[in-house]
Image (spheres, rainbow, N blue to C red):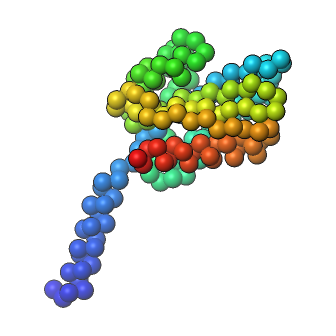
Amino acid sequence: MNRLSLKLIVLLIMMLLSSATHAVQRIAVLNFELNDITSLPNTPQEQLRTASIRPLLEQAISQNGNFEIVHIDAADQTAANAGVGYLFNFNDLAGKLGAQVGADWVIVGRHSKPSFLFSYLMAHLINVKTQTLAASFAIELKGNHEKVTLRGVRALTKKIYASIQR
């Protein structure tokens, strides 16, 4: 066997070993809850905007080949959620919900709207294995246009990637 063939074999083995150590992370994203404390709360437009966050976030996360989205049934989320903000505040329960579907991580989110001018995209990243809070995020959304929401979801996705890679 010549030197070039040997080098190619060694390179191939190294590539296989490195890909095996970077297993795909499984992430479950729960439906985001709307916490609208404006003088005209929970308008249909704001409810639709909040409902769009989960699919946008799942799409953004799945574009990275190191992550797989696993789905938690809405009925299971509702059954585990004793009230508004319950899963957001109790990381262990969100972690157990993620464990039921084989997730490594669970994202529990809230869309908090204290004003007509801005809102916050808030999310907790839960480590399912330890059932603890791995990171907490708050992204300010100035305005209520679709483009603003999409930009906020992209910013949240980058923060999630960085936290998982740590």
Residue 46 in the figure: left or right of residue 70: right
- Frontmost residue, 53 versus 157: 157
In the picture, residue 110 is in which quadrant?
Answer: top right
120 vs 76, nearest the viewer? 120
The residue located at (77%, 39%) in the rendering is 142
Within the image, what quadrant is residue 13 found in?
bottom left
Q: Position of residue 45 (x, y in %)?
A: 80, 28
**Number of numbered tags placed on the structure image:** 0
Q: Pinpoint residue 145: horizontal percent, then vertical percent.
A: 80, 40
| 61 lies above or below 42 | below
In this view, the residue in front, 27 or 126, is 126
Indicate left or right for 88 with 2 as reference: right
Q: Position of residue 102 (x, y in %)?
A: 38, 33
Q: Is residue 47 above or below residue 65?
A: above
Q: Quadrant of residue 85?
A: top right
> Which residue is at a point 70% across and 44% down the rendered structure image?
150
- Horizontal side, residue 78 vs residue 115: left or right: left
Residue 51, visible in the rendered structure: no
Q: Which residue is outermost to the left?
A: 1
Rendered position, 82 above or below 130: above
Percent x, y of residue 88 = 54, 23
User: Is there any visible trace of residue 164 in the rendered image?
Assistant: yes
Q: Is residue 133 above or below residue 76?
A: below
Tell me the quarter of the image containing the N terminus. Answer: bottom left
Horizontal arrangement in the rendering, residue 22 relative to residue 68 (left or right): left
Residue at x 39% of width, y 31% of height: 128
Residue extending furthest bottom? 2
Look at 53% across and 11% down and name the residue there.
82
